[in-house]
Amino acid sequence: MLTFRNTTIVFFILLFTLNILGMLWFPVHYYYYIILVSLYMTLSVSMSFFICSGYHMKALCNAVTEEKVVSITFDDGPDPELTPKLLDQLKTLGIPATFFCIGHKMKGNEDILKRMHLEGHLTGIHSYSHSNWFDLFSPIRMRRELEKSAQTVFEATGRKPLLFRPPYGVINPMLKRALHGTGFYVIGFSNRAWDTSSRKKEIILARIMNNLNPGDIILLHDTVPETIDIIKNIAEQIKQAGFRIIPLDQLLNIPAYEA
């Protein structure tokens, strides 16, 4: 299996081999070292953007099942205006969702977190800052963000979350070290609407339905007005396709909160 650990082992074996050849007076041009290091770095960096690859660490991206069930998740909230409107619709539709919330946005919006909890939705964390530079933070700083976000959810709901989705869906060795021993489940996605890129309602809906499979984790954003506008259409078309929308912890058979 292609993983960061296995790639690193092969890299050092090849590097050692080049050094041995050089010591035995075989002509080893420095270009070979440049090529080897470039390949190693390019692979490791590029694979960071594929959360479901398992290259750097394991992420739960879908359920392995033939049963026609899916879960809906929302990132980047809570938004003081849009998230309550979304909750109104979800309540009317009678469907559960999981919200991966940004820590600094939770501050001052604790009432929204409480409502999520009381209405049967799950709350996960999506870092505290959601900084563009999050992936370059030290493991210690990353871990502090996760703990601070989890504590904010706990103070609002009385439950400490175990579900974490990395900002931008990016994973790397620093994040793996930050998560070690924390108990967080890294949650990815298998059906992405890209609703922050193209906000045309028909495109958002088509992307979901054209790629819908049993066990899917659907990624949407409760910060996109167009998504809120068509959540009813999304839910109805999913059901018309014979699928049920169930809670994420039930789909993956994992706990959403600490016992």
Image: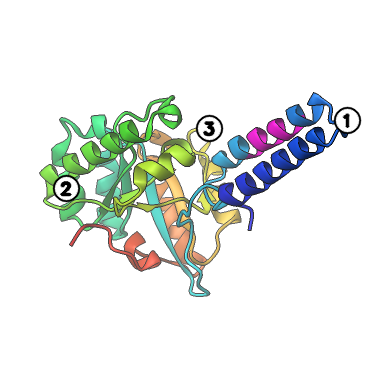
Q: How packed is label 1: few (under 14 Cα within 10 Å), some, or many (20 or more)? A: few
Which residue range is magenta in the image? Answer: 35-43
* Residue found at the far right of this picture: 27
On the question of residue 247 being in view, the answer is no
* Residue found at the far front of this picture: 24
| Residue 161 percent coordinates (x, y) | 24, 51
| Residue 179 percent coordinates (x, y) | 35, 46
- Give the spatial CA distance, label 3 vs label 2: 28 Å
Residue at mark 3? 197
The residue under label 2 is which amino acid type?
Answer: Arg
Q: Quadrant of residue 244?
A: bottom left
Does residue 8 lie above or below 251 as drawn? above
| Residue 230 percent coordinates (x, y) | 42, 45
Instruction: Identify the element where label 2 is drawn.
Output: helix
- Give the spatial CA distance, label 1 vs label 3: 51 Å
| Residue 210 percent coordinates (x, y) | 60, 55
Residue at mark 1? 27
On the question of residue 253 being in view, the answer is yes
* Residue found at the far bottom of this picture: 66
Instruction: Identify the element where label 3 is drawn.
Output: loop
Q: For this view, does 207 lie left or right of residue 253?
A: right
Q: How packed is label 2: few (under 14 Cα within 10 Å), some, or many (20 or more)? A: some
Residue at mark 2? 115
